[in-house]
Image (spheres, rainbow, N blue to C red):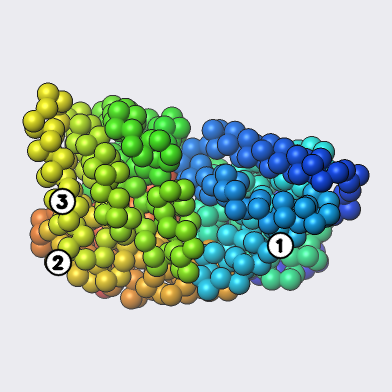
Amino acid sequence: MVERCIRGRAASEGVAVGPAVILRALEGASRAKGSLAEEHATLAAAVARARGEVAELIGTLEGDAAELIGFQLALLEDDALTESAYAHIESGVAAEAAWRAAMAAEIAGYEAADDEYFRARASDLADIRDRVLRHLFGLADDGPAPAGAIVVARDLAPSAFLSVDWTKGGGIVLGDGSPTSHVAMLARGRGVPMVVGLGPAWETLSGLLLVDGGAGLVEIGPDAERVARARAQAATLVQRRADAMAHQLEPALTRDGTRISVLVNISGPADMTALPAAACDGIGLARTEFLTGNLLGDEEAQYQAYAELMRWADGRPVTIRTLDAGGDKPIPGYTVDGESNPFLGLRGIRLSLRHPGIFRVQLRALARAAVLGSLKVMLPMVTNARELEEARAHLRAVLAELDDSSIAFAEPAFGIMVEVPAAALAAQDFAADFFSIGTNDLTQYATAASRDGAEVADYADVLHPGVLAMIAHVARAGRARGVDVSICGDAAGDARAIPALLKAGVRALSVSPGLLPMVKAAIRGLDLAALAEDA
């Protein structure tokens, strides 16, 4: 007999049974206070060790995971984060109290932000706070949970998720969180059952838990019969995934024979080891946010990185997005500090056009890599046709420079990422060589609901009729112009959304490498003619 069943929001499909492991902030630890100089040095060393840990963690990650943890590294590398703590130390406060006070102010600022996305990122600051505190107290970090456990917390930072070995089972239950949060994306990519949005009830959970990520349910104290059924469900899902893997090299054909292109999103070299190139139809999104510091001006280093992508794709099309900095991806000296709402500020192509020298370095490297195959350059955060033409003028200037040199080059296709509602509704006015719809930002901007905001998670739904209407409009505009239209946002890997996306006229999906086999399997189960009849 189940003692209690609590309903939350489904965030990642699957069923898991295991003991609850409650994650809370550090409590009760203490240390002896030293002199001002010693406290200053102790905090500096703890921050440096935390920074090294995060950098090391990034080195073990691939794809979206590395990009997400990069946010924490950027914060730890920002001296502004520690200035307040050092000021507290100078007033006679111990290092740990100074750090807690400084981080409390930072976290409060994020939690009070107008943007829901920033409020959700407060969990990253809490993770940084606790990581530094562990070093201050000399505590070992053995990871947030043992294998097979059900992680229970108010919220979960990406680094905490990534420190668990999920290959041994387990699940996640959160009081806050959102089905479209970054951690939820990571959970789906790794097949970890996850339920979010339980509210204060998460604090009452203990003992043996059963998590049904597809139904959004958490059962406390399930009996032996219920556990057996759950494990049978889990085994069935494992078999489905294994079957999908066995057929991942086959094309994605709907039941009525329509070929759907399934490409992959790449965030770094490690992603190219996640599956063979033959399993995909190319790279639908290669992120270049790794270009920080000196790399922004290093044409040769950029060229080598792009060339590696081209070689891996082995003749398949490769779409590389120009630098999409800003928002939650700050780059010191490049992005703008102190914007009241960075997600509606200078980011993506807006920043590139503000830094034409850096932009042209990237375009030169991309044009050089274009001789190696079918390369497509994608501009992020485009709002109006003028931006596309201004960017194209920079490309023409770069091509003219290369033509005067002895360096081999080719002109790449030049397209846009459609993620601003105004651009989606005016897609027919853009002389782009292709359109790629970024459903994450398009949805949150269209619904005025952050993808990471627990309170508004039900609003940020790609299946909202208004969002689907914009996607269908872009697909029609693409057909009218004779250019390819794809989707590279999170919705492309969501089996719940795929039928609606195909019904809207999309015929190319780009997903994280880990989701590709199941996406292909989902497509093979669909009949486009039947979907059209339902219109």
Using the image as rendered, state which of residue 427 and residue 110 is in the foreground: 110
Residue placed most toward the observer, 246 or 8: 8
Inter-mark Cα distance, 3 to 2: 18 Å
- x, y (%) of residue 193? 60, 53
Mark 2: secondary structure: helix
What quarter of the picture does the C terminus occupy?
bottom left
Quarter of the rendering occupied by the N terminus: bottom right
The residue sitting at 14% across, 26% down in the picture is 408
Most foreground residue, 264 or 344: 344
- Residue at 60% x, 48% y is 79
For numbered disc 1, what is the local secondary structure?
Answer: helix
Looking at the image, can residue 270 be seen? Answer: yes
Whole-percent x and y of residue 9? 59, 67
Q: CA distance from mark 1 to mark 2?
A: 48 Å
In percent of width and height, residue 340 lies at: 48, 69
Horizontal side of residue 145 vs 94, given as left or right:
left
Indicate which label's residue lies in the foreground, 3 or 2: 3
Mark yes or no: residue 240 visible: no
- Element at label 3: helix
**Residue 98, quarter of picture:** bottom right
Q: CA distance from mark 1 to mark 3?
A: 45 Å
Residue reaching furthest top?
406
Task: Write down the residue under mark 2.
Answer: 428
Instruction: Tell me the amino acid under the disc marked 1.
Output: Ala
Query: Residue at label 1?
Result: 104
Residue under label 3, please give it.
392
Callout 1: 10 Å neighbours few (<14), some, many (20+)? Answer: some
Q: Is residue 4 above or below residue 47?
A: below
Q: Residue at x 75, y 39 (%)?
A: 41
Q: Residue 288 — which label?
A: none
Q: Residues within 10 Å of mark 3 (few under 14, many from 20)?
A: some
